DNA sequence: CCAAAAGTGTTGGCTATACACCCATGA
DNA sequence: TCATGGGTGTATAGCCAACACTTTTGG
């Protein structure tokens, strides 16, 4: 049984071409029929679709998520949604906030428990979830038309990510296993929305002892090849424990 | 109409006798009957009470909150709950997180959207809400027996308060209009859970230009009378805007 | 040899911390 | 006059911000 007035939605962040991205989808309208258990609800859905051409349109996008099944845990279900969509098993996942204004979804009272997650684009395998018509990454500065209050939810998640990034080394979830210092810096620049000084940035990172030099270098680049690093997962966990010491 | 699977609960913090306090209540079990609209639900409630002697007991306490009415906004309803209980109109109120494990309330699936609030004990007027059998302040280090996962919710709210206090001058909501620097320091000590150096604390506070000297002093104290301060609401708002600059 | 990005140190100012004694008041 | 908490300054170490040139590589 599904809880018709509660949905769990995920804001998935990714980092590609030095840009912060968000994963959005278009859900199959037919799937909504799963929730129809009475004549009255059917009428509500019909009205919802009539009043919101956006819902059926190919030009409107939504957050990845569905209504909460009775027996599922909130955190666990958010994780399950991500697994289905990306194939990733061990993801960074945080509850952002619950949205519940009466008018946010017309003709329908739904609370949305929003999560955000950080995805490493190298490792995920974007499957079309059986619930989706299509799935796509969008640049954070170039969000398409979205249904309902999705824009507000994305903004709240982004704000949370920015806060989090100042005191926790969250950035690492978004990078490939081996990365250059320049990539790491661009990532923080794009999350924090400001330019950083290269020398100072490198000093700070080095002082944390968070990085391991892989002794490898970039190949086939038309400029001096950069060293590749991985991060030290033990130091990483220690820093996360201690919490508030990652001011960039 | 009331949403039976969603409740809004508030963790109210207060500061008295140099201790951080939490306001808890005992709800009237009879009120639960408001939610009974079917034979089946009545059975559920009966089982709930049979399996949880805590619910009827005078020895168990709960968070102030109720189920969410259909037409109410989440934030708005949390505010309304506070108004009814304390008479306060303009309160500091933040969403903490939504709790939703399937087993948290036995035999019943309820999501609880938790809020926390900071109350100035001088100004509130604890009314017994019509929903409550009793209401009482408890020392944060001496929480009584509580129903369900209330302890976990209080801990989450406390954690959020501690995080918040490091970067925002939240403490001021908990103090009377005129206060001494020693009071302010004790407040921060009790929120952060650590002793602070008096001279350094005072230096830092003075540098913020956040305080206005009222030119008044304590009266009838058996020691040198301390100066009384109020805080400068404009500077306060400016600091809140700027956000991350209130490390004590 | 040129373009493009990688990589590297020093300084001055500010901020955090550590620390101990005298003052005012009422009982 | 004593007990209680109020109130004050300085020195040191560490951290942060500002700033420009040389190196490596492929084309």
Image (cartoon, coloured by chain):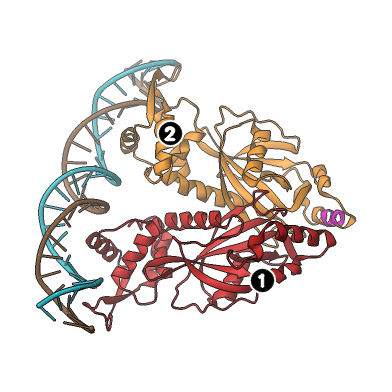
Chain colours: A orange, B red, C brown, D cyan
User: What is the magenta range?
Assistant: A41-47
Quarter of the C terminus of chain B within the rendering = bottom left
Q: CA distance from mark 1 to mark 2?
A: 56 Å
Position of A6 relative to B16 (above/below)? above
Q: In the picture, residue B41 is in which quadrant?
A: bottom right
In-front residue for pair B39/B53:
B53
Pointer 2 indicates a residue of which chain?
A: A
**Quadrant for the N terminus of chain B in the image:** bottom right
Residue B28: which numbered mark, if any? Answer: 1
Is residue A46 located in the magenta-colored stretch of the structure? yes
Do the CB atoms of the residues marked 1 and 2 lie less than 8 Å apart?
no
Q: Residues within 10 Å of mark 1 (few under 14, many from 20)?
A: some
Q: Is residue A161 above or below residue B12?
A: above
Report which quarter residue D19 is drawn in.
Answer: top left
Question: Going by the image, does B75 lie left or right of D20?
Answer: right
Residue matched to label 2? A184
Q: Residue at x 62, y 55 (%)?
A: A98
As drawn, is A2 to the left or to the right of B237? right
* Residue A200 picture location, percent across and down: 31, 38
Q: Nearer the viewer, residue B127 or A107?
A: B127
């Amino acid at each position: 049984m599904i809880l018709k007035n509660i949905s769990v939605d995920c804001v998935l962040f990714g980092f590609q071409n030095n840009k912060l991205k968000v994963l959005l989808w278009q859900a199959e309208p037919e799937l909504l029929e799963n929730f129809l258990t009475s004549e009255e609800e059917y009428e509500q859905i019909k009205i919802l679709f009539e009043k919101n051409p956006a819902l059926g349109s190919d030009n409107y996008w939504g957050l990845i998520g569905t209504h909460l099944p009775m027996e599922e845990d909130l955190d666990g279900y958010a994780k399950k949604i991500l697994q289905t969509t990306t194939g990733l098993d061990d993801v960074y996942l945080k509850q952002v906030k619950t949205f519940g204004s009466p008018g946010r979804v017309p003709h329908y009272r739904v609370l949305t428990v929003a999560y955000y997650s950080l995805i490493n684009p190298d490792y995920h395998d974007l499957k079309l979830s059986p619930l989706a018509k299509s799935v796509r990454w969008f640049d954070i500065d170039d969000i398409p038309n979205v249904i309902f209050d999705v824009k507000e939810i994305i903004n709240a998640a982004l704000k949370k990510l920015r806060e989090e990034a100042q005191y926790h080394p969250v950035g690492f979830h978004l990078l490939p296993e081996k990365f250059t210092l320049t990539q790491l810096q661009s990532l923080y620049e794009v999350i924090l929305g400001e330019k950083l000084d290269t020398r100072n940035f490198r000093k700070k990172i080095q002082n944390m002892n968070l990085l391991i030099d892989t002794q490898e270098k970039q190949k086939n680049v038309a400029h001096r090849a950069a060293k590749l690093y991985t991060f030290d997962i033990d130091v990483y966990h220690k820093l996360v424990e201690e919490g508030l010491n990652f001011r960039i």
